[in-house]
Image (spheres, helix red, strand yellow):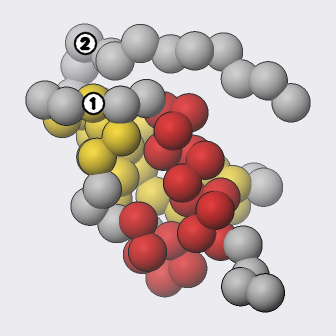
């Protein structure tokens, strides 16, 4: 599944990050891109991290949710 590339919004409105239909956190605008704020315990591994793009943040959250082998 491909996602469209999104530019940084001009407002301070948070962007929801849903993985497989379940909310995991929000992205808020940051000088260096987007800061991820987790709302579910399983996403706290990336809480507070800053990402250049929305896609990078979503990928990091997905990686954090993968069970360790």
What residue is shown with label 2?
10
- Asked if disc 1 and disc 2 are in contact, CB closer than 8 Å, the reply is no
- Res. 48 mark: none
Residue 22 at x, y percent in the picture: 68, 61
Q: Is residue 9 left or right of residue 53?
A: left
Q: Which is more N-terminal, label 2 or label 1? A: 2
Tell me what residue is drawn at x 35 percent, y 52 percent. 36
Name the residue furthest bottom. 69
Asked if 8 appears above or below 26 in the picture, the reply is above
Q: SS of the residue at dot 2?
A: loop
Q: Is residue 15 left or right of residue 68?
A: left
Q: Is residue 40 visible to the viewer in this orientation of the structure?
A: no
Tell me what residue is drawn at x 34 percent, y 66 percent. 47
Name the residue furthest front. 69
Nearer the observer, disc 1 or disc 2? 1
Residue 24 at x, y percent in the picture: 54, 62
Asked if 8 appears above or below 44 in the picture, the reply is above
Q: Nearer the viewer, residue 22 or 57?
A: 57
Residue 3 at x, y percent in the picture: 71, 23
Q: Is residue 27 left or right of residue 1?
A: left
Image quadrant containing the N terminus: top right
What residue is shown with label 1?
33
Q: Quadrant of residue 29?
A: top left
Tell me what residue is drawn at x 74 percent, y 82 percent. 67
Q: Nearer the viewer, residue 43 or 67?
A: 67
Tell how many labels.
Answer: 2
Tell me what residue is drawn at x 57 percent, y 45 percent. 58
Residue 27 at x, y percent in the picture: 37, 43
Image quadrant containing the C terminus: bottom right
């Amino acid at each position: 599944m491909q996602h469209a590339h999104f530019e940084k919004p001009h407002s301070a409105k948070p962007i929801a990050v849903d993985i497989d239909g379940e909310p995991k956190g929000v992205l808020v605008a940051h000088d260096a891109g987007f800061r991820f704020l987790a709302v579910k315990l399983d996403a706290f591994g990336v809480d507070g991290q800053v990402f250049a793009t929305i896609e990078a943040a979503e990928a990091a959250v997905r990686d954090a949710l993968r069970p360790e082998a």
